[in-house]
Amino acid sequence: MKECTAQFDSVVTENESLRGMVHHLKETQGQLLRSEKLASIGRLSAGIAHEINNPVGFVSSNSTTLLGYISRIKEILKMYRTGIRKEIIEKREKQLKIEFILDDIDKLIMENIEGLARITTIVNNLKKFAHDSQSGEFINADINEGIRSVLVLVKNESKYYADIITDFGDIGQIPCTISELNQTFLNIIMNAIQAIKEQERKEKGLITIKTWKDDAWAYVAVTDDGPGIPGEIRKKIFSPFFTTKPEGTGTGLGLNICYEIVVDKHGGDIQIDSRPGAGTTFTVKLPRTRGE
Ligand SMILES: Nc1ncnc2c1ncn2[C@@H]1O[C@H](COP(=O)(O)OP(=O)(O)OP(=O)(O)O)[C@@H](O)[C@H]1O
Ligand SMILES: [Mg+2]
């Protein structure tokens, strides 16, 4: 009997320590998720800064030019108000190139409006990307919209290496943690861009993003015409820290995090279809309703 109790006690202690370990693992997993998210935002931020810098540059230079134009127009206006002879004013108008200025003002203001709109789009997409990032709760969200925001953010990474075309189906909203799904789409799309980039080919590659639905599921397929994934590597790509990228480039956590988000958290699936030499398709499958 004593033996039995001792055995029972040791099972209980073992159970407790296992529970402790699981809890610890869950916490570590959470930390990894957060740090991978930060890392990918870090990787993107240089590109985003560049995207914002360009319009900021010309909006500010246009504004300086406009200030100069306005001071010339003010000078002419003042001459008209003081009743100076018309011929003299006209001569001064020629010197100050007022005719040209009046044309150019419209152009510069239109350019500024367009530049500011570009900045607004980038900022809005950043906000959308980070949406709900803290709570991690399920909300109904449009994943096409999420992918669109990711595409704005990766534009600077992709533009030299690949054209990206989209074929969005009408999938409506699905219950999800949208910022985590955005993170998933970002990781998969970045992998496709990086795979094409590594090939150092002459022409740009092609990435196609297609979404559709059936009764129970919403699907997102990301297809690239990159190098493909050899069979023996395909088995490992969802493992944490598995990477074929040079040290310091990839952490090997991208797809592991995607798996965690899509399969464990959403009850979905990620399928890979890859032909070495021809390209890869990652298909993310997500339930359109949430089971209990
Ligand atoms: N579209 C793809 N084409 C070819 N190989 C791919 C593709 N997507 C993933 N892989 C392979 O899977 C590996 C693991 O991908 P994963 O996203 O998990 O890590 P990583 O991209 O290497 O690093 P990280 O995403 O953490 O920066 C990659 O190193 C690459 O070998
Ligand atoms: Mg990756």
Image (tube, rainbow, N blue to C red):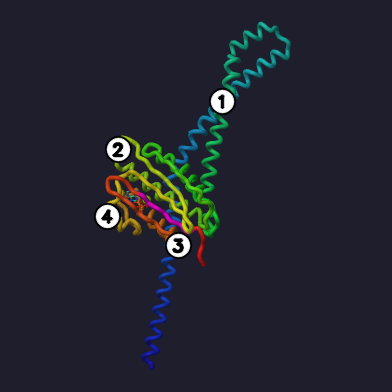
Identified by mark 2, the residue type is: Arg
Determine crowd level at label 1: few under 14, some 14-19, many 20+ residues with C-alpha closer than 10 A.
some
Question: SS at mark 3?
Answer: loop
Q: Residue at x 56, y 30 (%)?
A: 112
Question: SS at mark 2?
Answer: loop
Q: Can you name the residue that lies furthest to the bottom here?
A: 1
- Residue 16 shows in this picture: yes
**Magenta segment boundaries in residue numbering:** 281-287
Q: Above or below — where is 62 with respect to 154?
A: above
Q: Mark 1 points at which residue?
A: 108
Q: Are marks 4 and 3 in contact (CB under 8 Å)?
A: no
Q: Name the residue under label 2.
A: 201
Q: Which residue is drawn at 39% across and 53% down?
A: 254
Q: Name the residue under label 4.
A: 231
Q: Is residue 123 left or right of residue 192?
A: right
CA separation, marks 1 and 2?
39 Å
Sequence-wise, which precedes: disc 1 or disc 3? 1
